[in-house]
């Protein structure tokens, strides 16, 4: 079994800390699933190529996995806004 590390930027960690406890529990379970099997998320296309999206009901966890030991969390949020917000973040040069 490969040991993987999850890198969470400060702004995303702050957002997760501020979530309702029941939603936070779902996000935590999703993050554990991603660490266990990073390929489970759907590969994104076009401007977001290189990122993956993991579904949690109406929420999405967007992350980058380069087939290595480090998984970098890019964003967590509702499906309605997450892809546009992530695109704007990527265009600015972050994460």
Image: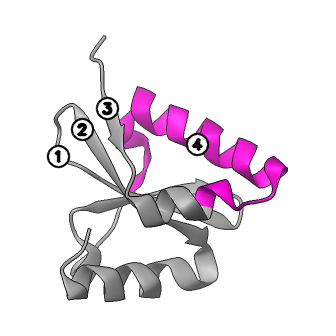
Q: Dot 3: what SS?
A: strand
Range shown magenta: 16-42
Q: In which quadrant will I find the C terminus?
A: bottom left
Q: Is the residue under label 2 in contact with that under label 4 (CB below 8 Å)?
A: no
Residue 71: which quarter of the image? Answer: top left
Q: Which numbered mark, 1 or 2, is in the foreground of this view?
A: 2
Tell me the distance, in whole angstroms, between the alpha carbons under discs 4 and 2.
16 Å
Disc number placed over residue 66 in the picture, else none: 1
Report x, y in % for residue 47. Answer: 24, 82
Q: Which residue is mark 4?
A: 30
- Residue in front for this viewpoint, 63 or 53: 63
Instruction: Label 2: state its secondary structure.
Output: strand
Q: What residue is shown with label 3?
A: 5
Which residue is denoted by mark 2 in the rendering?
70
Alpha carbon distance from label 3 to label 4 = 14 Å
The answer to whether residue 22 is seen in the rendering is yes
**Residue situated in front as seen by the camera: 65 or 11:** 11
**Secondary structure of the magenta portion, mostly?**
helix
Residue 10 magenta: no
Tell me whether circle 2 and circle 3 mark residues in contact (CB < 8 Å).
Answer: yes
Q: Which image quadrant is residue 77 in?
A: bottom right
Query: Tags 1 and 2 in contact by the CB under 8 Å rule?
Result: yes
Vertical placement of residue 92 versus 43, above or below: below
């Amino acid at each position: 079994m490969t040991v993987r590390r999850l890198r969470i930027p400060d702004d995303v960690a702050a957002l997760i800390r501020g979530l309702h406890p029941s939603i936070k529990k779902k996000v935590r379970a999703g993050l554990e699933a991603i660490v266990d099997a990073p390929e489970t998320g759907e590969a994104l296309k076009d401007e977001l190529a290189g990122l993956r999206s993991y579904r949690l009901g109406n929420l999405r966890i967007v992350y980058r996995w380069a087939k290595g030991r480090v998984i970098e969390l890019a964003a967590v949020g509702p499906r309605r806004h997450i892809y546009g917000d992530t695109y704007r973040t990527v265009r600015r040069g972050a994460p």
